[in-house]
């Protein structure tokens, strides 16, 4: 990625994140924190790439560790967020 | 590296679905759909990654995904709603650890990067590592594994020294790239210790803000490592979460009237910082009188706290509220911004019990109504109704916005014993003339009130 282009990407992404949260009602703060926690679980993709290029046993070990942690972040984040939001949905319909 | 178009497309689709999903999560009506969209995004991004040509260690990769994913999935299914904050903390810490580990692999490979890339890798590794160990401490505190705030001598100086050493070692890694493994090892060790040492002295009451801060940290770490790996999906997801998490942290700190620097550098320690002694005695009330008081009231405001949730009393409380409503009493629920362990946590717990939204009010919405209320029923809440926060400048919770429960005609406090709240500060409300204590575990205590209400008809 080009240096400057990434800088623009950083800036736009930061504003996107700020705007999304700014309008959120307090009742959704906990699920949203959990939801954003899930989204940075995409780190698992980076971990997979790192492990995919690992050569020595040490690199493989750290890479394995990274993928396992990232996968736990993603899976755990999804499950708890979905459980919380499912409760809200039920009440919406009622 | 030039990646095939279909891998790029999968990552792009993933990033798009994350943004759409997060947007959906910002409104109750679309929130559920939002997380499902984001979930599809994750699957798409992971699946696409497998198709990168020349990727090695695929067996290890699948094993790691299965191990991490399955264990977290099962623990996430099982965790109780009251324990949600520490669960979020630990998953978040794992993300931070993963980001730091990515940097470690990059350093170990000695891949020759330019200064900017190495610099971002170092910054990402540092905040990822701090988030990892810090979140582990946050988890241990909220889970009750770690009971007390541990304050080391010269804590603030120690924090600064450790941070300076970590930054110095990081700068060394950039200057010497590719650096020797001793320097890399020392850098990670110091970064991990820094997370521990910074978080250990922070009290449980401040933990929600800290978890939110670490959530933002992990986001940024992921964004920076995304740059190192040349993966825009990681950059977008990481930075969006970093920004959103920072704002959320500010909102929380504001709700508690505790500037972030206060939370990180001068933690609440009740006994040490004293506060004025409180005159008067606590007056007890039985379930019969409590029931009668509420039955013949016109307005009752319920102030639920974390204690109610721990006692699993929210269903009973709602049952009681329904009985009161049937008798013509108006019942409202007042939620302090930091009720529970995270903002909105109490709303989740009440939603679980079936309390409809239109009965739940924020601090700003309801605080003017306490003066007209006949009864304020405080269940398992303490610091958030402590009038000391308004009056006693020497109190550690001075300045925190509180619910004006003391202004109601009568206050009934359901409480297990005479102990202090999470901050360790004595509560002046309990000693006021219009306050009565209903001692007992919240669930049986409210069950008894329900019995008495039924007897009153």
Image: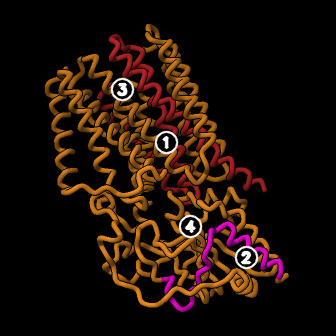
Chain colours: A red, B orange
Give the prevailing secondary structure in the magenta stretch: helix
Q: Position of residue B218 (x, y in %)?
A: 39, 40
**Image mark for residue B449:** 2
Residue at mark 2 shares a chain with residue at mark 4: yes
**Image mark for residue A37:** 1
Residue furthest right as drawn? B457
**Image mark for residue B102:** 3
Question: What residue range appears in magenta?
Answer: B429-455
User: Where does label 4 land, which residue?
Assistant: B305
Q: Give the secondary structure at mark 1.
A: helix
Q: Residue at x 48, y 55 (%)?
A: A22
Q: Is residue B211 above or below residue A43?
A: below
Q: Is residue B429 above or below residue B338?
A: below
Q: Residue at x 73, y 55 (%)?
A: A91
Placement of the N terminus of chain B among the 4 image quadrants: top left
Which of labels 2 and 3 is toward the front? 2
Q: Mark 4 near mark 3, Cβ–Cβ under 8 Å?
A: no
Compute the Cα span from label 4 to label 3: 40 Å
Q: Position of residue B171 (x, y in %)?
A: 17, 34
């Amino acid at each position: 990625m080009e240096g400057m282009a990434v800088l623009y990407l950083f800036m736009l992404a930061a504003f996107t994140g700020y705007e999304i949260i700014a309008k959120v009602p307090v009742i959704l703060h906990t699920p949203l924190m959990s939801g954003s926690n899930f989204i940075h679980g995409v780190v698992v993709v980076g971990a997979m790439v790192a492990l995919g290029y690992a050569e020595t046993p040490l690199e493989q070990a750290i890479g394995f560790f990274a993928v396992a942690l990232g996968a736990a972040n993603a899976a755990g984040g999804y499950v708890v967020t979905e459980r919380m939001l499912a409760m809200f949905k039920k009440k919406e319909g009622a | 590296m030039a990646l095939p178009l279909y891998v790029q497309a999968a990552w792009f689709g993933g990033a798009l679905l994350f943004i759409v999903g997060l947007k959906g999560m910002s409104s109750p009506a679309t929130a559920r759909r939002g997380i499902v969209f984001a979930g599809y995004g994750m699957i798409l991004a992971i699946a696409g990654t497998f198709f990168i040509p020349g990727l090695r260690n695929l067996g290890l990769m699948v094993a790691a995904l299965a191990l991490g994913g399955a264990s977290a999935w099962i623990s996430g299914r099982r965790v109780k709603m009251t324990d949600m904050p520490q669960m979020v903390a630990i998953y978040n810490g794992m993300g931070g650890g993963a980001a730091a580990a990515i940097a470690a692999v990059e350093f170990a490979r000695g891949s020759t990067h330019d200064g900017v890339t190495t610099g971002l890798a170092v910054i990402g590794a540092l905040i990822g590592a701090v988030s990892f160990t810090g979140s582990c401490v946050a988890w241990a505190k909220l889970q009750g594994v770690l009971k007390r705030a541990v304050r080391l001598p010269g804590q603030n100086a120690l924090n600064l020294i450790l941070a300076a050493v970590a930054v110095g070692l990081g700068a060394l890694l950039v200057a010497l790239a590719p650096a020797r493994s001793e320097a890399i090892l020392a850098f990670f060790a110091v970064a991990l210790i820094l997370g521990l040492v910074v978080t250990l002295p922070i009290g449980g009451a401040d933990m929600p803000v800290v978890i939110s801060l670490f959530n933002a940290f992990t986001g940024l770490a992921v964004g920076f490592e995304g740059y190192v790996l040349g993966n825009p999906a990681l950059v977008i997801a990481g930075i969006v979460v970093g920004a959103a998490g920072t704002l959320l942290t500010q909102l929380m700190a504001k709700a508690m009237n505790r500037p972030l620097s206060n939370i990180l550098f001068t933690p609440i320690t009740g006994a040490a910082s004293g506060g004025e002694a409180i005159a008067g005695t606590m007056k007890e009330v039985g379930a019969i009188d409590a029931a009668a008081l509420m039955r013949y009231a016109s307005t009752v405001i319920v102030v639920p706290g974390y204690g109610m949730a721990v006692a699993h009393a929210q269903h009973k409380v709602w049952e009681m509220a329904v009985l009161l409503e049937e008798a013509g009493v108006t019942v409202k629920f007042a939620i302090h911004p930091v009720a529970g362990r995270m903002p909105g946590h109490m709303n989740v717990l009440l939603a679980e019990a079936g309390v409809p939204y239109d009965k739940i009010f924020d601090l700003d919405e309801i605080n003017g109504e306490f003066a007209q209320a006949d009864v304020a029923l405080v269940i398992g809440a303490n610091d958030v109704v402590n009038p000391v926060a308004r009056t006693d400048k020497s109190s550690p919770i001075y300045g925190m916005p509180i619910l004006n429960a003391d202004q109601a005609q009568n206050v009934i406090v359901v409480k297990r014993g005479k102990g202090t709240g999470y901050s360790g500060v004595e509560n002046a409300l309990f000693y006021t003339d219009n306050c009565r204590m209903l001692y007992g575990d919240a669930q049986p205590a409210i069950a008894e009130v329900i019995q008495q209400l039924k007897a009153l008809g």
